[in-house]
Image (spheres, rainbow, N blue to C red):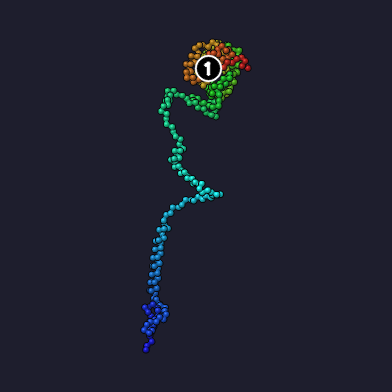
Amino acid sequence: MATPQPVTANGTGTIVEPHDGGLVHRGSASIRLSGGSVLGAWLGSIAVHIALFAAMLALVVPFSLETKTPEGPVARVELVGSVDAGAFTPTKIADLPTQSEQVAMETPPVPPPDRFAPPADLTTAKKPDLTIVGLGVGGGDADRFGLKIGGATAPQFFGLGTTAQAARTVVYVVDMSGSMLDTFHFVRAELRRSISSLRRSQKFHVIFFNSMTPLENSPRKLVSAIDAQKEQFFDFLTGITPNGGTQPSEAMHWALNLDPDLIYLLSDGQDFPASLPGELDGWNKNRRVRISTIAYLNPLGRRMLEAIAREHQGEFKFVSEDELP
C-alpha cells in the first residue's frame, strides 16, 4: 500500500495528510510570496489608512473651525466675615449713557422767550458800561465807546474829582478877574499840583476868563500830559495876571467844544449872568461832559455854581480862607 503524501490545503501553508479516510493537521509552513503580491498588500493597507484618516478629519475639522464667542473677564469677589445670604441684594449697574444722551445732559436747557416781555427800546443808543480791570487811567478814545478804566480816579482839583472816574481829558476854566489878584498864587499852585499829577496818557487844557476875551495857552486844544507839555504850560502860567470883571460864558463854550470828559469851573464871582445855566444846558444837552464847580472864597456866588454842578453830574465845593495854606 502506498504512503499518503502531505497535501497543502487551499495554498494557505497549512499541511494536512490523509488518515483513516480523513485529513490530519500537521502544522504550518512558511509561504513565500512574490514581489507583486507584497506591493499589492502595501498599497491596499495604505489605501485603507488614508480612508480612515479622511473619515476622522471630516469629523474633527468642523468642530475645530466653529467660531466661539470669547467670554468677558469674570470679576472675583472675596467676602470677608460672615454674610447673611438672605439680606444680600445684588445691585444692578446702570447702563452708561450714549454720546447723544451725554450731550443732552451737558447742554443747559434754553428757556423759551417771554412773549409778554416789553420790547427793547431801539430808539435810544446807550453805551455799555464796561470796566477794564488792571489798566491805568487814560489811553486813546476808549471812553467814546463806553469803556471805563477800573481802579482810577479823576485828577484832583481843590479836593474834587471823586465822582468822575477815569477822566482822561480835563479842561480847567479858571477865573482871572481883578478880585482874584490877592489870592491867585494859591490857584496857581493848585493848578501846578493838579496838572503835575496827570499821567502821560491823559490830556488837559486850561482856559482863563475875565470880562474880556478868554486867555489860553497855545496850541489852544487838549494836549497830552507829557512833561514837555506840562512845562510849557507852567511857563505860560507864570505870566497870568488877574484883572477885569467876571464873564465865564465864552470860556465855557470853548471848553465844551473840546468835548472833554470833565470841566472844572472855578470862580470867586457873584455876578454871573443869569443866562449862563441855560447856555450850558444847550451846549451840553446829553450831559456828555461832567462839570464840577468851585466857589472860591466868596460864598455869594455858590448858589449858581452848585446848581450848575448838580445839573451836569459834577461836584461842587466851597473853598474858604481857612482851607488855603
At label 1, the amino acid type is Ala
Which quarter of the rendered picture does the C terminus lie within?
Answer: top right
On the rendered structure, is 270 left or right of 42?
right
Q: Position of residue 37 (x, y in %)?
A: 38, 74
The residue depicted at 51 percent of the width and 49 percent of the height is 85
The residue depicted at 41 percent of the width and 28 percent of the height is 115
Query: Which residue bears the numbered disc 1?
Result: 309
Which quarter of the rendered picture does the N terminus lie within?
Answer: bottom left
The residue depicted at 40 percent of the width and 67 percent of the height is 49
Residue 226 in sight in this render: no
Would you place residue 163 above or below residue 70 in this image? above
Extreme-right residue of the structure: 325
Query: How many C-alpha atoms fall within 10 Å of the one at disc 1: few (<14), some, or many (≥20)?
Result: many
Q: Position of residue 206 (x, y in %)?
A: 54, 18
Residue 282 in sight in this render: yes
33 or 57: nearer the eye?
57
Q: Secondary structure at mark 1?
A: helix
Quadrant for residue 193, please give it. Answer: top right
